[in-house]
């Protein structure tokens, strides 16, 4: 194992939760799968998500499993000295090694942090046995049926609502012009095949008349999955066919307990030219908006998020540029009863108007780049990037190949996990450079070890 000086963060989530917090209480971070076979006991499902969209592309489930397993490290790296619970429903008495490997992966990642900035992590395989300190409700990235019985920092129904693309389109925040198409079918008619087909035809008909270019969105998506760009008639036909298949599955999950959450609406939104930046903020308990970082976003050919980058020298100007938007979003979320981390995707048009194209009330992939400002500045590194990649080498071999970069602090493994066979690993890496050219050199070296996602 390559050794290096402990990583010191400028601040942590614990520090942010302490702001405007008169009773000095703070939550327990809880990480659990939002959809898993072991959640079948919690049925019918109340909280429905659409990141597992069925497409013509073949997706290896082992890759998706690693992407989900690495989330506690991605979101918990900047947690600070606060309790954190990982609910691992894949661990069984027959295969206990899975849980052991997960513990080792998480322990290795957090061990690189300064001792007083490491979360206190506990693990459980039983949703009914989540360890909580008195007065410490759970703060979660996405509401899940598995932990809906626990005390929550934010009402999970409210949290689910504000994570919805539908809510954002109707919230009164500055967003592109949008149309919301809600299903009309009632739960007692879901299993009537004729009525179901009629409902799908009704919802997808809007795709025929909405003027291109536009974006079609499912309400509950992550990392760009379930979001489709339509710029041609071929795109329109392809997306209509794709959503027709998906809606048949989605509508079958509507029932009386989640109908009011609008889990299966469609959002059609005007396309605003320009690159979206990732704006990370924190909403305090009293509704103040605190700027964390503003980053460029990186997406793969499928439109899925795979990383982002930051220029530290430009952060002061970007904070001022988005100050009004930060406060507007904070006030809106505070009225809904939310406080905590928030990630926004923002496009600025040629006239200087800001449009929010996505809002995620949770820690986002580039969130930790803000607290790493001085870590990189002290090393003369003004640029940093985050990459999310798959590798065929184990962590030890990767660390050996990048021993110099890890030792000098220009590369940080902010998340790493591996499959049961140890032949496939998934890494969440943070890389710094004195300029873009130096940063790209390290990223190119990383790419030499990468296997393309299946």
Image: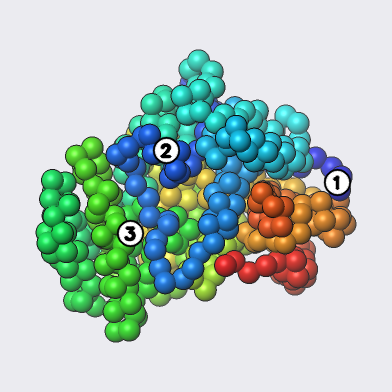
The CA span between labels 2 and 1 is 37 Å
Q: Residue at x 57, y 62 (%)?
A: 306
Residue 173: where, in percent of width, then height? 31, 53
Q: Residue at x 60, y 48 (%)?
A: 70
Residue 107: where, in percent of width, then height? 72, 37
Q: Can you say whether 283 is above or below 217 in the image?
A: above
In this view of the protein, can residue 365 be seen by the observer? no
Mark sitting on residue 218: 3
In the picture, measured across the screen, residue 205 lies left or right of residue 75, that is left
Labelled pair 2, 1 in contact (Cβ < 8 Å): no
Q: Can you say whether 197 is above or below 125 in the image?
A: below
Q: Residue at x 31, y 62 (%)?
A: 246
The CA span between labels 3 and 2 is 22 Å
Mark sitting on residue 358: none
What residue sits right under mark 2 in the picture? 39
Residue 289: where, in percent of width, then height? 46, 42
Residue 140: where, in percent of width, then height? 47, 37
């Amino acid at each position: 194992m390559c050794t290096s000086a402990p990583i010191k963060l400028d601040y942590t989530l614990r520090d942010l939760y302490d702001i405007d917090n008169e009773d000095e209480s703070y939550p327990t971070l809880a990480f659990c799968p939002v959809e898993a076979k072991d959640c079948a006991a919690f049925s019918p499902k109340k909280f429905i998500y659409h990141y597992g969209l069925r497409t013509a592309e073949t997706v290896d489930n082992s890759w998706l499993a690693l992407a989900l397993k690495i989330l506690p490290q991605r979101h918990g790296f900047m947690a600070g000295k606060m309790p954190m619970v990982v609910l691992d429903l894949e661990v069984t008495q027959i295969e206990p090694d899975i849980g052991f490997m997960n513990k080792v992966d998480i322990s290795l990642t957090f061990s690189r942090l300064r001792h007083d900035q490491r979360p206190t992590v506990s693990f459980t395989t039983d949703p009914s046995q989540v360890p909580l300190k008195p007065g410490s409700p759970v703060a979660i990235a996405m509401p899940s049926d598995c932990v809906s019985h626990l005390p929550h920092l934010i009402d999970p129904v409210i949290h689910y609502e504000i994570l919805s693309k539908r809510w954002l389109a109707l919230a009164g925040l500055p967003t592109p012009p949008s149309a919301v198409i809600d299903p009309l079918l009632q739960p007692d008619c879901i299993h009537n095949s004729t009525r179901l087909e009629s409902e799908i035809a009704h919802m997808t008909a809007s795709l025929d008349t909405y003027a291109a270019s536009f974006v079609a969105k499912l309400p509950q998506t992550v990392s760009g999955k379930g979001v489709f760009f339509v710029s041609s008639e071929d795109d329109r036909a392809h997306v209509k066919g794709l959503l027709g298949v998906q809606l048949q599955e989605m509508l079958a999950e509507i029932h009386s307990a989640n109908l009011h959450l609008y889990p299966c609406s469609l959002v059609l939104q005007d396309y605003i030219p320009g690159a979206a930046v990732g704006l990370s903020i924190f909403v305090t308990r009293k509704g103040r908006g605190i700027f964390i970082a503003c980053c460029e976003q990186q997406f793969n050919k499928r439109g899925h998020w795979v990383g982002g980058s930051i220029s530290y020298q430009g952060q002061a100007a970007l904070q001022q540029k988005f100050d009004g938007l930060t406060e507007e979003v904070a006030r809106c979320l505070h009225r809904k009863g939310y406080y905590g981390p928030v990630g926004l995707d923002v496009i600025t048009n040629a006239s200087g108007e800001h449009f929010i194209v996505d809002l995620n009330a949770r820690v986002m992939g580039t969130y930790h780049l803000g607290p790493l400002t001085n870590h990189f500045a002290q090393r003369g590194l003004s640029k940093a990037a985050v990459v999310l990649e798959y590798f065929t080498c184990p962590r030890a071999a990767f660390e050996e190949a990048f021993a110099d970069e890890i030792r000098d602090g220009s590369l940080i493994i902010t998340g790493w996990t591996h499959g049961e066979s140890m032949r496939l690993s998934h890494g969440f890496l943070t890389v710094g450079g004195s300029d873009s050219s130096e940063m790209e050199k390290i990223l190119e070296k990383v790419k030499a070890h990468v296997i393309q996602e299946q």
